[in-house]
Amino acid sequence: RDDCLYENEDVQEALRRLPDHVVDERNFRMIRAIQLSLQKTILPKEEWTKYE
């Protein structure tokens, strides 16, 4: 699977409408995923996202 992300105009508009903290959380998760992919490691289970 490709690690590159393409955001078209619809996605950019949806992101613009989101609250800043939600966009920040999304960006953090993407950066973390890219970092782990480059390091070829798996996120520790205690750091997995919990379903609410």
Image (tube, grey):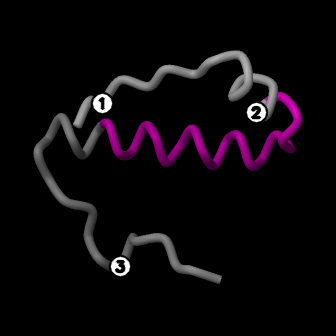
- Crowd band around label 2 with a 10 angstrom C-alpha radius: few (<14), some (14–19), many (20+): some
Question: Residue 43, labelled with which disc?
Answer: none
Q: Are marks 1 and 2 in contact (CB under 8 Å)?
A: no
Quadrant where the N terminus is found in the figure = top left
Look at the image and say whether residue 6 sits in the magenta stretch: no
Of 39 and 7, the residue lying toward us: 7
Q: Nearer the viewer, mark 3 or mark 1?
A: 1
Circle 2 residue: 15
Between discs 3 and 1, the one toward the N terminus? 1
Q: Residues under labels 3 and 1: Cα distance?
A: 23 Å
Between discs 3 and 2, the one toward the N terminus? 2
Amino acid at dot 3: Glu
Res 5 quadrant in image: top left
Of all residues shown, which one is farthest toward the left?
40
Circle 3 residue: 46
In magenta, the rendered stretch is 16-34
Res 35 quadrant in image: top left
Expressed as whole percent of the image width and height from the top left, the position of residue 12 reads 72, 23
Of 31 and 10, the residue lying toward us: 10
Expressed as whole percent of the image width and height from the top left, the position of residue 42 reads 19, 59
Where 8 sits versus 48, above or below?
above
Q: Residues under labels 3 and 2: Cα distance?
A: 28 Å
SS at mark 1 in the image: loop
Circle 1 residue: 3
SS at mark 2 in the image: helix
